[in-house]
Image (tube, rainbow, N blue to C red):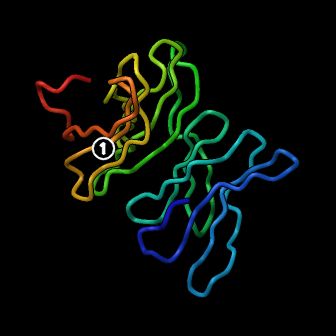
């Protein structure tokens, strides 16, 4: 469940018994269930609002999708992974001031890693990669730090790294 930046609408993944799923909205003032903004038999989940609250990124069919809210809805995959990286992608957080999305990337060799997607350039960049599991990355409110969880020390703990990544900080 994610709260829209205007604090008036929730977005959440809804799974139905017949296997269908979708991203739904719930309006807080007045309280009412809003429209389903995505439909899928491949698992729409993990919505995250863009900072302006006009679109959502979410996972569907193992890919990160984006959909504009209001007006004409256009649902599209934000990017396509390379052939050597197969697995699910889960969006976790948009940068508060840039069109940069943090997402968790499933990889057969390195498990779960944190990557960045720059919407303006289409560039995919590694942010945290190791043999451990890294997930749940979020930007700080000022966009200068990224917090995430990792089991790098044998148990899950919270780590932080500067954004953009500075020399001396390993990926």
Residue on which the image places disc 1: 147
Q: Residue at x 62, y 33 (%)?
A: 62
Q: Quadrant of the N terminus?
A: bottom right
Q: Quadrant of the C terminus?
A: top left
**Is residue 81 toward the left or the right of residue 135 in the image?**
right
Q: Residue at x 11, y 26 (%)?
A: 167
Which residue extends farthest bottom? 30
Residue 149 lies, with reference to residue 85, above or below; the image says below
Image position, residue 144 (x, y; %): 19, 48
Image position, residue 122 (x, y; %): 40, 35
Q: Residue at x 36, y 31 (%)?
A: 123
Image position, residue 91 (x, y; %): 49, 43
Count the marks: how many?
1
Image position, residue 99 (x, y; %): 35, 49
Q: Residue at x 40, y 16 (%)?
A: 131
Residue 26 lies, with reference to residue 21, above or below; the image says below
Give 155 or 85, whichever is nearer the viewer. 155
Which residue extends farthest left? 167
Which residue extends farthest front? 155
């Amino acid at each position: 469940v994610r709260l829209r930046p205007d604090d008036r609408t929730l977005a959440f993944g809804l799974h139905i018994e017949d296997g269908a799923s979708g991203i739904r909205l719930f309006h807080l003032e007045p309280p009412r269930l809003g429209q389903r903004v995505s439909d899928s038999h491949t698992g729409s989940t993990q919505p995250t609002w863009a900072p302006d609250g006009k679109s959502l990124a979410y996972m569907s069919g193992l890919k990160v999708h984006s959909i504009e809210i209001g007006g004409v809805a256009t649902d599209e995959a934000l990017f396509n992974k390379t052939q050597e990286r197969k697995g699910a992608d889960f969006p976790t957080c948009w940068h508060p001031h840039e069109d940069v999305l943090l997402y968790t990337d499933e990889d057969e060799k390195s498990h779960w890693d944190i990557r960045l997607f720059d919407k303006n350039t289409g560039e995919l960049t590694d942010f945290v990669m190791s043999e451990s599991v890294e997930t749940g990355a979020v930007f700080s409110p000022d966009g200068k730090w990224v917090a995430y969880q990792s089991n790098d020390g044998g148990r899950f703990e919270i780590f932080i790294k500067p954004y953009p990544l500075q020399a001396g900080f390993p990926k």
